[in-house]
Image (cartoon, rainbow, N blue to C red):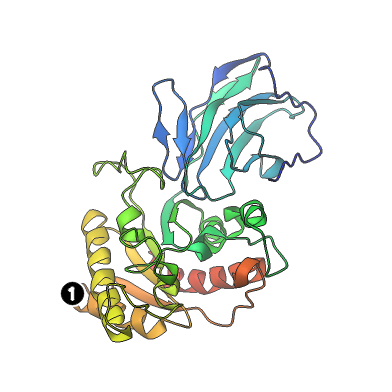
Amino acid sequence: MRYVFLAAVAALILSSPADAQTALTPNIGGRAVAQPDGTYAFGWPGVYFEGRFTGRSVEVTIDPQFEVLAVSIDGQRRNEVAIPGVAHMTYDDLGPGEHVVRVDKLTESQTGSARFLGFKVGKGGQALPPPTRPRKIEFIGDSHTVGYGVRATKHSCTKDEIHDLTDTSLTFGSLLARRLNADYRIVAFSGRGVVRNYAGTSPGQTLPVLYPRMIPGEATPTVDPAEAWRPDLIVIGLGTNDFSTPVAPGEAWADAEALHADYHQTYVRFIGELAKRQPQAKFLLIAGDSFAADVEAVAKTVDAQTPGLATPVRITGMGLEACNWHPSIADQRMMADRLEAAAKVVLP
């Protein structure tokens, strides 16, 4: 496991809270489940919490469980915390004026969840309304969207290395959202596909099946249909796991042709369900090397029903230098470039 504490912190206390008086209302990016005690549990990749305040001191309280959470102030990363248990961190080296404090979930939790317990501004400071951004983007996908082992510079990684070198803050989703000044939500799970998971594992537990969950490893609670989240853009990257390994005897498809037909039908239906719930959103569909024709066919079918709704974005030429031949940091930047160009066409 990774236990990292970055330097340049004037005061860091992991055992007892400092003199902090005023709680900050957070801006929450991603799915988080409010608990009876006022805390939040969260498990999907890339979840973040932000608070805004004036003053020289702020307290951050988190419980990473078995994940890695990063703490930043005014865009500067101060700590990466991976020690299970409640951590109270006080930063009292801040200058006068307005500040933004942020917690980012870096790793992927396929089971379990981390907890956010709150921000508090120190004595003499003032709580301000949380940050807001003019756009919202949702990213739905697999390990490429998660940032699986993206910090690695080798292909062969242990299970612990994959966990510790995963960093969703370095992925195309986070990069694109920052470039477009958007809040974002990431609903992604390594190894999952539209109708088939990697090598046929976990049948019946594909990404569209998991999508309604508030925490990926827990069947309940599910998303409230009346929630206020209204993305302008939904980016989907699914297909690598459907087609990266041949259909084996005993799977649900007689052959590759049947698999491709099921992928097309199910993907079109999934987009239709999302569009019905989010009629304001446009869709970008990532078309990778092994399934570009399938995605282009899906987009054509969707647009025949609702012209201009879905745009395929061809992604090719990745170096795949991270763990188990996954996208590197450079690949993630390239994907962000391609998606940014497409997004600027479809967004107002």
> Can you say whether 72 is above or below 138 in the image?
above
Residue 333 visible in this rendered orientation of the protein: no
Relative horizontal placement of residue 202, taking residue 83 as reference (left or right): left
Q: Nearer the viewer, residue 167 or 347?
A: 167
Q: Amino acid at mark 1?
A: Gln
Relative horizontal placement of residue 205, taking residue 276 as reference (left or right): right
Residue 69 visible in this rendered orientation of the protein: yes
> Can you say whether 27 is above or below 243 in the image?
above
Q: Nearer the viewer, residue 302 or 53?
A: 302
> Can you say whether 283 is above or below 161 in the image?
below
> Which residue shows up at 45% across the image and 82% down it?
290
Which image quarter: residue 83? top right
Q: How many marks?
A: 1
Which secondary structure, mark 1? Answer: helix
> Which residue shows up at 52% across the image and 58% down it?
146
Q: Quadrant of the N terminus?
A: top right
> Can you say whether 136 is above or below 329 in the image?
above
- Which residue in the rendered view is the most extreme toward the left? 305
Give the image location of residue 98, x and y in percent.
63, 32
Give the image location of residue 205, x and y in percent.
34, 58
Relative horizontal placement of residue 244, taking residue 88 as reference (left or right): left
Residue highlighted by disc 1: 305
Query: Would you call the spot at circle 1 few (<14 residues within 10 Å), some (14-19), or many (20 or more)?
Result: few
- Which residue in the rendered view is the most extreme toward the front? 249
Which image quarter: residue 7? top right
Which image quarter: residue 64? top right
Give the image location of residue 191, x and y in percent.
46, 64
Give the image location of residue 302, x and y in percent.
24, 74
